[in-house]
Amino acid sequence: MTRFVAIFVVCSLFCGLTVSQDFADGSHHHRKNRIANCRQNYVAETEEAVNLQINLELYASHVYMSMSYYFDRTDVELPGFAKFFKDASAEEREHAEKLMKYQNQRGGRVRMELVEKPARDEWGTGKDAMIEALALEKEVNSQLLKIEELATDNNDPHLADFITEHYLIEQVESIEELSRHIASLERVGPNLGEYMYDRKLLGKE
């Protein structure tokens, strides 16, 4: 009798585990393939473009963080530039998070990809870094323009307006700001001029 009870308990536990695992697998499969109720007029092509932009914004954040801690080094010691690029890094991360939130709002799926490492660890002078930052901001802007164009082609005015209001206007301002920094740094020159400009960026001119 005791042996029969033991076999029954073991069989019950095994069957329960199998059912639970099947249920879990089925539930996961269901969640993976279901379409969000809020999804409307949001095509797969624009969903993928938004995910690519998320990755690019995170890459830009990595680049600016690398720049920030390069200028923070004791053998470089330009705290104004370090602060400037650290703020830029935080801003790019916020841009990525805003796009993630938007992806969920439209019923898309956020797909995190491997973020490419910055092309270098040494950034030269403050002017050199500003020139690299300007090129990066233009690249980000170009990709945003492609999303806006894609949204327009797919009759998605909500996405087009979102990109214009929250990104394109700010990109134009960032490109102008970096261009002015580069022109000013060319005027003041290296060494002492760069040091004084660093103080200005730090708010201690």
Image (tube, rainbow, N blue to C red):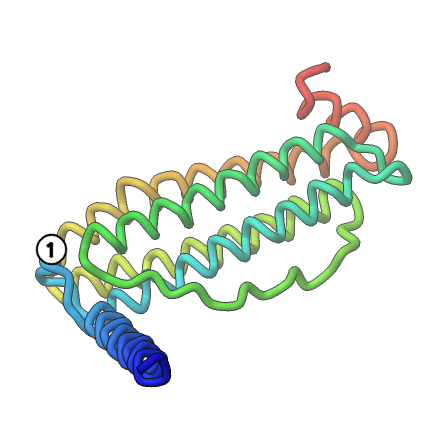
* Residue 51 visible to an observer of this rendering: yes
Q: What's the amino acid at mark 1?
A: Cys
* Residue 153 visible to an observer of this rendering: no
In the picture provided, is 66 more to the left or to the right than 114? right
Residue visible at 48% across and 45% down in the picture: 93
Q: Is residue 178 above or below residue 18?
A: above
Q: Residue furthest top?
A: 204
Provide the secondary structure element on which disc 1 rests: loop
**Numbered marks: total:** 1
Measuring from the top left, give residue 176's x and y in whole percent: 49, 39
Q: Is residue 1 above or below residue 148?
A: below
Q: Residue furthest right?
A: 75
Q: Is residue 7 above or below residue 104?
A: below
Measuring from the top left, give residue 177's x and y in whole percent: 53, 35
Q: Which residue is mark 1?
A: 38
Residue visible at 74% across and 28% down in the picture: 198
In the picture provided, is 184 more to the left or to the right than 71? left
Quarter of image, res 201: top right
Q: Quadrant of the C terminus?
A: top right
Q: Is residue 38 above or below residue 42?
A: above
Residue visible at 78% across and 23% down in the picture: 196
Q: Quadrant of the N terminus?
A: bottom left
Quarter of image, res 26: bottom left
Q: Residues within 10 Å of mark 1 (few under 14, many from 20)?
A: few
Measuring from the top left, give residue 139's x and y in whole percent: 48, 59
Given residues 149 and 86, the one toward you in this image is 86
Residue visible at 83% across and 40% down in the picture: 73
